[in-house]
Image (cartoon, rainbow, N blue to C red):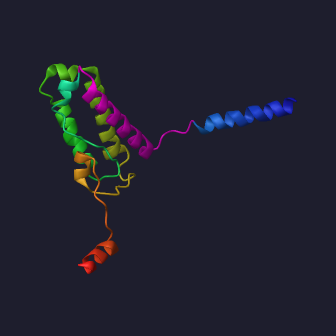
Amino acid sequence: MRLGLAALLCFFSSVLLSDCAPPTCYSRALGLSQEIMVLLDKIHTYHLTKSCAEILPPIFLNVHNSCVTAKLRDFLYVVLNHPSQQCRERPRMVILKRKIQNLYRIITRICYRDLVFLTDDCDAIDTGHHRPYYGEDRLQLLQEDR
C-alpha cells in the first residue's frame, strides 16, 4: 500500500515539475505580443481610455514578421509622446508602455537572432491582412501562365 502511494506521489510531483520550465525567448515574445493585443483592445473599448486610443496607430503584432521591430519602435514613440498628459498617466496606458518596451527589448536584445522571421510584410502589421507568400517556383509558374 505504501509503495503504491509513494509511486503515485512521485508521478504527480514529476508532472508538476515538468510544468515549471522557464519560458523561452520565443514563447515569451509570443505571449507578450498577445497580451499587448488584448490590452489594446481593452484600451480602444474602455470609456476612459477610448479618447486616448484615437491617436494610437493600428498595429497587429506578429513576431514572425521582420518589420515588427520598426513598428514597435514607432508605436512606442507615439505612446511615450502622447499629447495628453492625462492619457500618459492612465494605468492602462502605463501598462501598455511597459509591455511594449519589454517586447521591444526581448526582440532586439535578449532574443536577438533566436527569432525566425518568416515574412517581411510591413503592411500586415498595419492592416492585419497577410499577403500570400509565393516561393520562387510558384512565381515562375505564375509567369509561365501569362
| Residue 15 point in image, percent of width and height | 65, 37
72 vs 49, nearest the viewer = 49
Image height of 90 relative to 70, above or below: above
Residue closer to the observer: 142 or 11: 142
On the image, the x and y values in percent for residue 109 come to 33, 44
Could you tell whether 21 is left or right of 11 in the image? left
Q: Image quadrant of residue 53? A: top left
**Residue at left 22%, top 36%?**
76
State the predominant SS element of the stretch in magenta: helix
Q: Nearer the viewer, residue 19 or 137?
A: 137
Left or right of 15 on screen, residue 50: left
Quadrant location of the N terminus in the rendered image: top right
Picture residue at 31% right of the left edge, 60% below the top: 132
Q: Residue at x 34, y 75 (%)?
A: 137
- In the image as oriented, which residue stretches furthest toward the left? 83
Q: Quadrant of the C terminus?
A: bottom left
The image shows residue 99, relative to residue 133, as above or below, that is above
Residues rendered magenta in the picture: 20-48
Left of 20 or right of it: where is 53? left
Residue 18 appears in the rendering = yes
Q: Up-down: is 109 above or below 84?
A: below
Percent from the top left, x then y, of residue 14? 67, 37
For this rendering, which residue is in front, 69 or 105? 69
Q: Quadrant of residue 39?
A: top left
Number of dots carrying numbers: 0
Q: Is residue 15 magenta?
A: no
| Percent position of residue 127, x then y | 23, 47
Q: Residue furthest bottom?
A: 144
Asked if residue 107 is positioned above or below residue 49 in the image, the reply reads below
